[in-house]
């Protein structure tokens, strides 16, 4: 079955930050969606996220426009292009001065998706179907808290913001890649931690399941909820509804 994506992207500076270091791109025609969050505390986070989006999107659009299937290898190529572009900006800078960013990508092709991430900008798959409705995080947080054992989690000794890998930082990145099937009325959500840190899992489930047929309202509701709950960071999301023809 061919599914047709309809997306809505929203971003807000939040109530605390002086600049917005999040970037995103939604291309329904090609089924390409990217979101990046410049690392807080690093210089030029906005530049890093913008450059990463541009480099990865350029590679992905090339594959689409030359009718090459975007498989895991080509998705990793796009992440590598983003990593090189930001790393090149860091050439000659000390580690303390280097810029970095998260990067999350989702690709929709007919009734299939492939997605990947580096960092902690999340991707959710929304499946609102009868008695088996689910909202699942399909990305993996590359943060110390996510990778430590439960005894450290319970102690609260590590900061959630301590990333274990990021675009532009270090020599090697290992994107988390996942793929799967889609059905009519599924949805995908990409969001920065300015959303996922301020909108709890229960609220994300409630908002996404109730508004999955209206990506604009879903995106607006996620951003507004993040702001209402403190808005302590830039908050950005892309909501993608998948619809059969005529639906």
Image (spheres, rainbow, N blue to C red):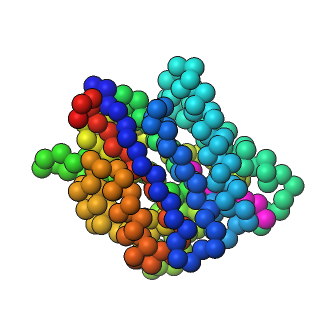
**Residue 98 left/right relative to 9:** right
Looking at the rendered image, the quarter that the C terminus falls into is top left
The boundaries of the magenta stretch are 97-103
User: Which residue reaches farthest top?
Assistant: 67
Among the 4 quarters of the image, the one containing residue 186: top left
Report x, y in % for residue 126. 30, 49
Is 217 inside the magenta-drawn segment?
no
**Residue 211 left/right relative to 192:** left
Q: Residue at x 53, y 26 (%)?
A: 64
Rendered position, 108 above or below 97: above
Instruction: Judge by depth and name the residue closer to the eye, 25 or 86.
Output: 25
Is 99 inside the magenta-drawn segment?
yes
Rendered position, 128 above or below 111: below
Q: Residue at x 70, y 66 (%)?
A: 42
Report x, y in % for residue 121. 50, 57
Evaluate whether residue 185 shows in this view: yes
Instruction: Judge by depth and name the residue closer to the eye, 52 or 93.
Output: 52
Task: State the predominant SS element of the stretch in magenta.
Answer: loop
């Amino acid at each position: 079955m061919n599914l047709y994506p309809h997306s809505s992207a929203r971003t807000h500076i939040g109530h605390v930050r002086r600049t917005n270091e999040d970037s995103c791109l939604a291309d329904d025609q090609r089924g390409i969606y990217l979101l990046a969050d410049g690392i807080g505390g690093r210089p030029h986070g906005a530049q890093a996220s913008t450059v990463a989006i541009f480099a990865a999107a350029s590679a992905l659009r090339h594959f689409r426009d030359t009718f090459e299937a975007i498989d895991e290898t080509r998705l990793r190529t796009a992440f590598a292009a983003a990593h090189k572009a930001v790393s090149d900006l860091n050439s000659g800078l000390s580690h303390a001065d280097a810029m970095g960013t998260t990067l999350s990508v989702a690709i929709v092709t007919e009734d299939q998706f492939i997605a990947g991430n580096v960092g902690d900008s999340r991707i959710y798959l929304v499946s609102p179907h009868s008695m088996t409705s689910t909202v699942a995080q399909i990305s993996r947080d590359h943060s110390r808290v996510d990778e430590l054992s439960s005894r450290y989690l319970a102690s609260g000794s590590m900061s959630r913001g301590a990333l274990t890998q990021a675009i532009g930082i270090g020599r090697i990145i290992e994107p988390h890649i996942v793929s799967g099937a889609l059905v009519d009325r599924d949805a995908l959500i990409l969001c920065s931690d300015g959303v996922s840190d301020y909108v709890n899992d229960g609220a994300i489930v409630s908002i996404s399941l109730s508004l999955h047929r209206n990506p604009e309202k879903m995106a607006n509701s996620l951003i507004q909820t993040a702001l209402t709950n403190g808005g302590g960071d830039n908050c950005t999301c892309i909501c993608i509804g998948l619809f059969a023809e005529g639906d």
